[in-house]
Structure formats: C-alpha cells, structure tokens
Image: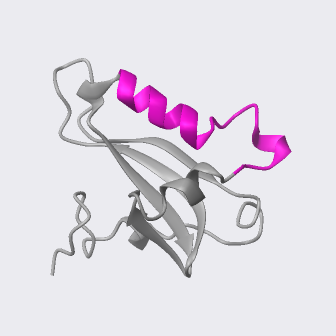
Amino acid sequence: MITLRPLDGGNRDAVLALRVSSEQLAFVSSVEDSLREAEEEPGGRAMQWALYDGEIPVGFVLISDNVEGPGYIAQYLWKLSSTRAISGAGTALPPSTLSPSTSVDGRASR
C-alpha cells in the first residue's frame, strides 16, 4: 500500500536519493531541485512528504498550503514524483493517500 509520510531527518537522505525513470527526466525535477525551489518561494508554504510502498520510500510530494499573499493558489499539489519501481507498475496513488487520517502538518487527526 502506498502511504504518505512527512519528509524529515529520518528519511530525507533516502528520498533525496530517489530517481525517476530516464523517460521521465525531461518532465520531473529532482527532489533536491524541488526542495530548492520551495526554499526560493517561502510564500508558497511548501510542505514536504515522502511516498512509501510499505517501508520503502518510492516518491516525493510537495504540497502548498496556507499560502502567503494573492500571488499563490491557496492549496495545490506543487510537485509529485515517483520512482521507476512504482511508475507504470500498476500501482496507483489512491485518493485516500491524502486522507483525513493525516493532517497537513503530519499529525494524525484522530
């Protein structure tokens, strides 16, 4: 099952090491580039997440929430990337991946 976990010191290096397939390189920025972009746009209030398949990190999500100012869309999916391990492997990200059981600040809502 694919789950969403906050990006933190315990998984940051593993997520930074993830790579998309060579066919996707022209379309998807690296995790490192995505994090740098978020730092350059602090008003976007980026929230960083890791995608896991069980206990294995397989992707990265950058969400913008509670933005600063009218130049930003209020809430949006900024970046989404997944490794070759799940891209095209018939593994889908169900709508429940961003479920009410995990709030945007990473704390369980129950």
The residue closer to the viewer here, 33 or 89, is: 33
Seen as rendered, the residue at the extreme right is: 22
Q: Residue at x 73, y 60 (%)?
A: 87
x then y, percent, for residue 31: 56, 42
Whether residue 107 sits left or right of residue 12 in the image: it is: left
x then y, percent, for residue 65: 24, 42
Establish if 82 lies above or below 99. Answer: above
Queried whether the magenta region covers residue 22, the answer comes back as yes
Please report the bounds of the magenta region as a residue range. Answer: 19-40
Q: Quadrant of the C terminus?
A: bottom left
Q: Residue at x 61, y 69 (%)?
A: 92
Establish if 84 lies above or below 94. Answer: above
x then y, percent, for residue 11: 48, 62
Whether residue 89 sits left or right of residue 62 in the image: it is: right
Q: Residue at x 75, y 31 (%)?
A: 26
Q: Residue at x 55, y 55 (%)?
A: 13
Q: Quadrant of residue 37?
A: top left
Queried whether the magenta region covers residue 89, the answer comes back as no
x then y, percent, for residue 36: 47, 29
The number of discs equals: 0
Whether residue 69 sits left or right of residue 87 in the image: it is: left
Whether residue 93 sits left or right of residue 68 in the image: it is: right
Establish if 36 lies above or below 85. Answer: above
Q: Quadrant of residue 1?
A: bottom right
